[in-house]
Amino acid sequence: MKIQLLIITLLVSISACSVNTGRYQQHKDSMPSRAPTASELIDITPRAEPHSRGGNRSQYQVRGKTYSVLKSAENFSQTGIASWYGEKFHGHLTSNGEIYNMYAMSAAHKNLPLPTYLKVTNNANSQSVIVRVNDRGPFHQNRIIDLSYSAAYKLGMMKTGVANVTITAITDFSVTEIKEKLTENNLSTDSEQRKYIQVFATKNEVLANKTAQALENLYQINTIIPMNDGLFRVQMGPINDEEALNTLLTSLKKSGYPKAFSLK
């Protein structure tokens, strides 16, 4: 009897250890206890990066299935179902060796090189985000991308958990060229030529201020936030040259602000 009790005790101990030594502490994924802050909902700024050492083998296998990794994200676009991943994976390594942060604007994709910047648009409500792909997945059938919690939250997909999206790779990193063109062509002082671009409008004053500051730092163009009808309107300018204005407007639309427009 003592021997039997000892064996049972050892089996229980081994079982407990096997549970605790797994990669993830949670068995199932879950939503975090707090929503993203305003600053955590600002799109990431795309920039040219070399492919990471980790996560970019030409082929890899998961659950017996082989996946191929693209050499380039140039002209890549895809439409399908997006899901998201959160608390279970937070703080763990991504496929390229970084630490997953569910409050960062990141994503996982099965085939794109790491890292890749994507514009993701929710086809149900036209909301869009810019994310940086630094992980592999999702490995569930019929899903094309796994989004971070913040990205999914901004896209308005928390109630359903999934969304039909269109993803488009961003491979044009010409912000520096845009800055130079804006500086070069913005020297005119003719007040009649001065124009502004309205980037977007929101009721969230904190989000408006954070976004305006980020855009001003990125493009080195003055931003203002006039309020009208209960909306904070993030505007950039004045811009004195039509070509410079159109260049900036095109860049903004590619970077997650499709409703940006010129104020005549």
Image: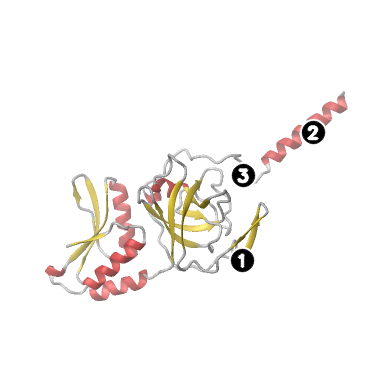
Name the side, left or right, on which 110 lies relative to 44.
Answer: right
Residue that mark 1 sits on: 58
The secondary structure type at the circle numbered 1 is: loop
Task: Report if the CB atoms under discs 1 and 2 are less than 8 Å apart.
Answer: no
Q: Dot 1, crowdedness within 10 Å: few (<14), some or many (≥20)?
A: few
Mark 2 or 3, which is nearer the eye?
Answer: 3
Residue 10: assigned label: 2
In the rendered structure, which amino acid carries the disc numbered 1?
Ser
Farthest residue, direction bottom: 184
Q: Position of residue 125 (x, y in %)?
A: 35, 48
Q: Earlier in the sequence, mark 1 or mark 2?
A: 2
Name the side, left or right, on which 248 lies relative to 171.
Answer: left
The secondary structure type at the circle numbered 2 is: helix
Front residue (pair 70, 39): 70
Q: CA distance from mark 2 to mark 3?
A: 24 Å
Residue 24: assigned label: 3
Q: Dot 2, crowdedness within 10 Å: few (<14), some or many (≥20)?
A: few
Query: In the rendered view of the protein, which quadrant contains the N terminus?
Result: top right
